[in-house]
Image (cartoon, rainbow, N blue to C red):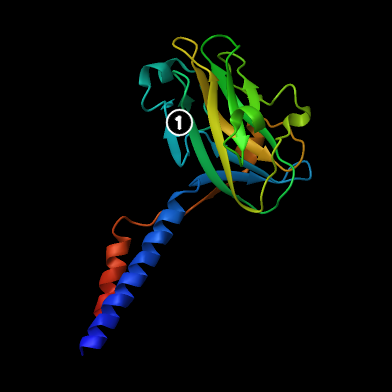
Amino acid sequence: MKCQYISIKLFIFVMSSFFMMQLVLTGVAVKEWRESELNGGWQIWISATDFVEMQGIGTSQTEVKLAEKATKPWLSKEILIATDLGGFADFEFESPVEGDAYMWGRIADFRGGGQSWFIVLNSLNHEGEGLIFGTPGLAWQWIGNRDVPHSQSPTDLKKGKNTVRIVPREARADVEPLFDVFMISTKPFEPTDADFNAAKERGLAVEPADKLSTTWASIKNRL
């Protein structure tokens, strides 16, 4: 009986660890995104506030007064607002293919232009391997890197998990840069708001908060 009791406890521990790992893994990817297949390629559209980690950057929820001044409409429910340098926002997503990547962002600022963001794919070296998106002013625009043909990323897409990091390159009070949505395409492609709106909505199912405890109660009752 003692050996059986130990085996049951070991089984519960192993299964508990497995379920906890599953919860962590599903929590690190973007939860909502859009996909399209335009210009002979595949595109993913991700809100700049669907990050897995963020430091030193505000959002329209934390910078409410600034958000009230930002031009509408936004394509996302919320936007990024960089009030200073030194911060970043990280994202993770799945790609069905590998190879060339072309990146664009829907951005704006409070200065009238002249601010900028870094965006880097599958690297933490945003200055060396990222693209620079210069802000256009108060009106939202889709911007790519003007010095790189078709805004092609120096780093490629991977089949499976990919990472993106967004970093404010210029930011200070009264000229804060804003970020709404970024798009990554496998083919040269200049996006529009209409393309985003026509893209298919995707998302991860969010389990109820008490699903894990309910699962364990069920397992124990069957032992």
The answer to whether residue 93 is left or right of residue 84 is right
Q: Nearer the viewer, residue 70 or 83?
A: 83
Q: In screen coordinates, is 215 left or right of 32?
A: left
Give the x, y percent position of residue 38: 74, 42
Image: 30 above or below 108: below
The residue at which mark 1 appears reads as 78
Picture quarter with the C terminus: bottom left
Q: Residue at x 49, y 33 (%)?
A: 89
Residue at image coords 74%, 35% = 189
Asked if one can make out residue 205 in the rendered structure from this viewpoint, the answer is no
Please state the horizontal and vertical placement of residue 222, each as a whole percent of the image: 28, 81
How far across and how far down the image is residue 90, in percent? 50, 38
Q: Position of residue 54 (x, y in %)?
A: 44, 34
Residue 112 shows up from this direction = yes
Name the image quarter holding residue 197: top right
Q: Quick one: 3 or 55, which is closer to the camera?
A: 3
Name the residue nearer the viewer: 14 or 128. 128
When the figure is inspected, residue 120 is found, relative to residue 64, above or below; the finding is below
Mark 1 residue type: Glu
For the residue labelled by badge 1, is the local secondary structure a helix, a strand or a loop? loop
Front residue of 219/148: it is 148
Q: Residue at x 70, y 52 (%)?
A: 97
Question: Number of labelled discs?
Answer: 1
Residue farthest toward the bottom in the current orientation of the protein: 1
Check disc 1: other Cα within 10 Å, few if <14, some if 14-19, many if 20+: some
Q: Is residue 11 left or right of residue 41?
A: left
- Residue 90 left/right relative to 213: right
Q: Quadrant of the N terminus?
A: bottom left
